[in-house]
Amino acid sequence: MKSLIKIISVLAAFGISYLVGTASLTAGEAPQLASQVKAGTLPPLNERLPEIPLMLPVEDEIGQYGGTLRRAFLGPGDHNNYTRAVYDALVRYAPDGSQIVPHIAAGWESNYNFTEWIIRLRAGAKWSDGQPFTADDILFWYEDMLMNKELMPGGVNWMKNEDGSMAKVQKMSDYLVKWTFKQPNTAFLLNMANLDGADKSISNLVFVPAHYLKQFHPKYAPKSSLDRKVKDAGFDTWTQLFAVEALPHLSGNRPGMAAWVPDGTTVSDKVFTIKRNPYFVGSILREISCPTLMQSVSLFMQTRKL
């Protein structure tokens, strides 16, 4: 396994763009955020981008900063309307569907028989609230969500070995996480590309903001405080509250890694707004910070029979 880490380090050292890219200290700032930077309420762009930004290709031309995309959605049951817009996953399908490419994560490596996989995160990446995104956010998902029998009693199928046991997840460093299966898992990256919080289910997650969700978990939160949060939210159990707060479009307040994050509204509101994430890991040509679109506003449209 040491050789795998060495391979990753060598690739990073040579700046292999498919896996890593290179950091930029000169990427352009969105004018709408420049005033916040000047006022000192938002760090400068070179402090918000990770050391290895996600380099996004230009299809036709580079967009202009600003604007609002106005969309329609059908209410709480139309939650995947949000996930299709943001695609918040560690890796993703290429636009033409031909391959899996890095996204929130910088890259990956496997051993010769695909029983071990290493996901390499982007050093310096941050959640939308400015807190660091590290291996601890994956370990929290693994140890405190997946392995918690109250929260996820059945686990998830993609993590199960052939004997029914769960694969192991290990933190190797702040930005390296290793999965170990008992048998070859050639579908690992395909599964990763689909773990974007779709279907309003925590089963479709693989990384979460541990610093935010600990306040809703009995392992970390005082019982009196958690009981009060559950009651105030109108739930009966902590697991019901946690399942909502773990998903951005249900919570409205949960920090995210996507290009756009909810502004406090949710898919249960008549108007659901997602705004530009100033800490998004992406950049265009190492010169333009992303995204250029500032927000997307979805209006609830109730269907009626004619």
Image: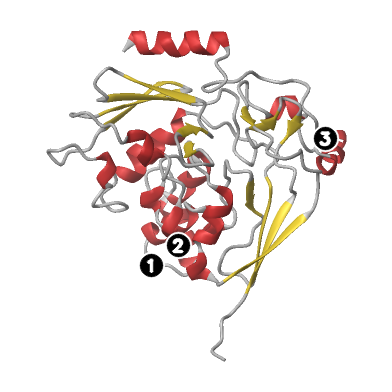
From the image, tell me which residue sits under label 3.
37
Label 2 environment density (alpha carbons within 10 Å; few <14, some 14–19, many ≥20): some
Where residue 57 appears, as percent x and y from the top left, is 65, 33
Q: Residue furthest toward the bottom?
A: 306
Q: Residue furthest toward the left?
A: 163
Return the residue nearer the eye: 293 or 220: 293
Residue occupying the point 15% across, 38% down: 162
Residue occupying the point 50% across, 12% down: 11
Q: Are marks 2 and 1 in contact (CB under 8 Å)?
A: yes
Q: Amino acid at mark 1?
A: Asp
**Labels 1 and 3: the sequence-earlier one:** 3
Residue occupying the point 69% across, 57% down: 296
Using the image, determine if residue 99 lies above or below residue 254: above
For label 2, the SS is helix
The N terminus: image quadrant:
top left
From the image, tell me which residue sits under label 1.
236
Residue 243, quarter of the rendered image: bottom left
For label 3, the SS is helix
Q: CA distance from mark 2 to mark 1?
A: 7 Å
**Is 149 situated left or right of 78 in this image?**
left
Label 1 environment density (alpha carbons within 10 Å; few <14, some 14–19, many ≥20): few
From the image, tell me which residue sits under label 2.
230
Return the residue nearer the eye: 63 or 280: 63
